[in-house]
Image (cartoon, rainbow, N blue to C red):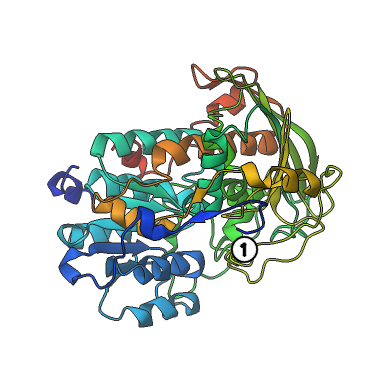
Amino acid sequence: MKRRNFIKSGTTALTAAAGFSIIPSTVLGKSYGNIAPSDKVNLACCGIGFRGGQIIKALHKTGLANIVALCDVDMGAPHTKEVMELFPDAKRFQDFREMFDKMGDSIEAVSVGTPDFSHFPITMLAMSLGKHVYVEKPMARTFKEVELMMEGAKKYKVATQMGNQGHSEANYFQFKTWKEAGIIKDVTAITAHMNSKRRWHGFDPNMTKFPDGTPIPKTMDWDTWMVTAQEHDYQKDFVNGQWRCWYDFGMGALGDWGAHIIDTAHQFLDLGLPYEVDPIKLEGHNPFFFPFSSTLAFKFPKRGDMPPVDITWYDGINNVPAVPDGYGVSEIDPDIPPPSDGKLQPAKLNPGKIIYSKELTFKGGSHGSTLSIIPEEKAKEMKSSLPEVPESPSNHFANFLLGCKGEEECRSSFDIGGPLSQVFTLGVLAQRLNTKIVFDRETKRITNNPLANALLVGEQPRKGWEEYYKL
């Protein structure tokens, strides 16, 4: 690589739930008001268009960050101009390696709002230089990359946050409180569903090769866009959100929405990694892009005194799961950020989950949406006995920046977001290979399919990008 010398010189580094009550944030947190620039976190931002741009604006809105650098491989393209104009004094780069080489001493933390496959090299380099990292979900594209990122966070002792913002909103505190109070207990099954139209719906499932290349836009540094991935010719269907369609670049509907739907259940039920993932249904399966519909069964073993849990994931417009009697109306939280291609399209069943325990059934949405007990009659019966639930002392972005300052613990740090992301990588392998995955939780190996086991590590990185796996 041309820019490797800098590493050696760098620093090592709510009301929807019956009986859902709130304790004011003033009881738990403090008001942050006006903060001197010297007390803010100097933040560099990688990926400044679409979702990356939303992250930057949300981090800046906390009043806890100085935006000192902007980095995007398509700097100056229409989707990057808004953020460029918002922060005219921030230094601009197209290559994150050059940014760290020239500005490393001025950067304390980094936001990574780039495609899934490029999270890994940016994050690993940032951590190795002692920078705190906020990275969008899922953490990375392969099981091994996530493993290395978790190890890196411990090695370099930096604050980390995966961007599943529901982990700092009402559902997080409600689930935690209800689990500790014994309201949520003995969970045996979870239905998780995301049935809206996806970008690849309409692609040809009989595709025999990737789309032909087209001229590279003048604003685009295509070589740096590819980072560790295999060589590809530039194609508009690989960029600006379209990357999510392809196994080479993204994690499909599961990686996109899974973290917003099953994150609290995964953490507070101590699920860890599954021992089996079974692709029950894959409609439109092909080797290039994600199926039009998927039903995946994840099996988790008994944990302590908690029974085994099956999570069944449904995506696809016409792949809607059955709901229990008394389910009620499927609502969508208006606070959920829209996808980068516009407004979330209504579905027959809006994104969410149904949690089945031995005694109670819970209905929930996505992101920070709270759970409700169903049927409604049961919720009314239990209303007076439900515990008070604290309000979040900080949103997800402030929580990260306060974590950088040592004032809070990040609620979705890599040790929490990592195993969740690895669940998704195993699910994607089941989709990609159209095969059952049998996983040894102790050795972290797939025991029934040598190809799937090899893909835990993934393909060889492009020449010149191998060093990121050794940081």
Direction from residue 243 to residue 192 in the image, left or right:
right
Residue 422 visible to an observer of this rendering: no
Q: Tell me: residue 74, above or below residue 272.
A: below
The picture places residue 366, in percent across and down from the top left corner, at 63, 53
Direction from residue 295 to residue 9 in the image, left or right:
left
Could you say which is closer to the camera, residue 424 or residue 81? Answer: 424
Could you say which is closer to the camera, residue 86 or residue 22? Answer: 22
Instruction: Count numbered badges in the picture.
Output: 1
Q: Tell me: residue 359, above or below residue 260.
A: above
For image coordinates 24% across by 49% down, the residue present is 406
The single residue placed furthest to the left in the displayed view is: 9
For image coordinates 63% across by 72% down, the residue present is 342
Residue 182 visible to an observer of this rendering: yes
The picture places residue 239, in percent across and down from the top left corner, at 55, 63
Direction from residue 432 to residue 80 in the image, left or right:
left
Q: Tell me: residue 123, above or below residue 341.
A: above
- The kind of secondary structure element at disc 1 is helix
What residue does disc 1 label?
237
The picture places residue 128, in percent across and down from the top left corner, at 25, 43
The picture places residue 163, in percent across and down from the top left corner, at 46, 53
Give the quarter of the figure containing the C terminus.
Answer: top left
Q: Quadrant of residue 345?
A: bottom right
